[in-house]
Amino acid sequence: MLHCGFGASEARSVVTTQAPIDPHHTANPAKVKRVEVYWHAVTYKTVAAYTFLLLAILFGATYLLRPGWYSFVIQKLDSAVGNGDAAAGPISQTQARFVNLDGKVQVKKVNSVQWVDADYRTTLDKGDLIQTGADGAARITFADATSYTIKPQTLVTVEENSVSRDQVSTAVRINTGSVDLRTPSWTSPNSHAAVSAEDFTAQIRPNSSASVKTDPSTKESEITMSAGSAEVQHGQEKVEIGQWQKAIIPANGSISKTDVLAPPDLSEPRNLAPIVAENPKAATIHFEWKPVKDAVFYTLRISPTAMFTRLAKEIKTQSPAADVSGLDTGEYFWNVIATDAKNRNSDVSEMFKFTIFAQGKAQEMLLEIDGWRINGQHAEIYGRTEPGAALILNGQPVPNIGPDGSFRYFTEALQPGEHTIVIVGQNRRGGTSQKQITIVVPK
């Protein structure tokens, strides 16, 4: 009996064969021999089911034996299928994006009558309105890296936003409130960034930083340069201001220009420094900055938010240093304002960030840095730690740690030169570990 697979439906066939008739043998008829042939059909659904079961067994065995490889494949598939648009979606030449959001921030698109809450997926076009609440602040970045920080209770309009091969042009109009802006180095002399209000326009030079505010109730505006320079135009009048100079623009009358107090240069704790203490709340953290000429006292501000909408500590001191305690574990930002004898304040200093960790009493965790490489202005750091551990690299959490503890992290854009990268980790038992490497970004 023969069985064979042959079709999509089940069937049976009987084939009969008969031996040749012998003419000399007529008395007894010949016996008839029979051969029966059967076959079974297997459907396509059955084939697919068995194939799927075999693949599932193979993937299951691979996951148990090499979980790291499994995670790598899943990440690649997710990147190719799910995140393809995000990976291939840089800021367009006519749009800007939010890079920091804190508190209430709303946007009204130019073609809409409705205000909506801003998020990091919101893109900004010419004519869009941005409004911050009393506890709100936002930072937007244009395609050329020009950034505008919108302070609380501010209403601004995106007036210009274009990037071409020959020039970069960005502009924001302040309806009310205050804005800080920073410009990059442009390769084209035709590029410009501007900020304006009802009675003036300021053209900001490359590699410059400025603070601008306007008050419709007093009809007076002012702009202070902390780096670089700007040209301020009020009607037909034009005034050039440089670093640590302020221009006051009244509704009626001429622009007045004065020198302002420079802010302090921060020293300690250094930017992105990790601070590990057995009892963070009781630990004393030393803050220090360089003294400023003509300053009679300083105001140290420490905040859990980068926009300083909430303060954890605010300390006034005549010394260019202060010791602070009473801070819980977590991330903090700090800056300093200098004040002279005439009660005139400097601009806010550069902002530094630090993180406080609780030192675990358990055995130190596994944390190894296997290596690093430079990709453009970014550093790729890779290594291994314990599964389930949490890592902070230069003040930023490492989001993707594999089931086997392997990790790979790309830093933010780094300026050419030498940089110290600090990695701090904590495992589930409360143990902590810290590693530090020095990398050099070529020019």
Image (spheres, rainbow, N blue to C red):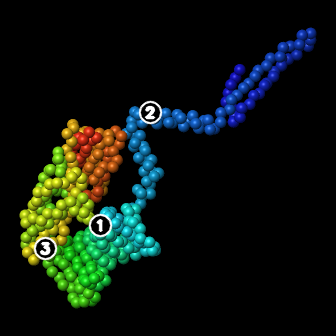
Q: Residues within 10 Å of mark 3 (few under 14, many from 20)?
A: many
Q: Residue 251 location, x and y as percent?
A: 26, 87
Near-viewer residue (50 or 173): 173
User: Residue at coordinates 9% horizontally, 71% vertically from top-left?
Assistant: 295
54 sits left or right of 353 in the view: right
Q: Which mark is residue 61?
A: 2
Of helix, strand and loop, which one carries label 1?
loop
Of helix, strand and loop, which one carries label 2?
helix
> Where the C terminus falls, by quadrant?
bottom left
Mark 2 or 3: in front is 3
- Whether residue 24 appears in this view of the structure is no
Q: Quadrant of residue 266?
A: bottom left
Q: Which residue is mark 1?
A: 135
Q: Are the residues at dot 2 and dot 1 in contact (C-beta closer than 8 Å)?
A: no
Q: Residues within 10 Å of mark 1 (few under 14, many from 20)?
A: some
Q: Residue 267 location, x and y as percent?
A: 13, 59
User: Residue at coordinates 31% horizontally, 83% vertically from top-left?
Assistant: 198
Mark 2 vs 1, N-terminal side: 2
Q: Which residue is mark 3?
A: 261
Mark 2 or 1: in front is 1
Of helix, strand and loop, which one carries label 3?
loop
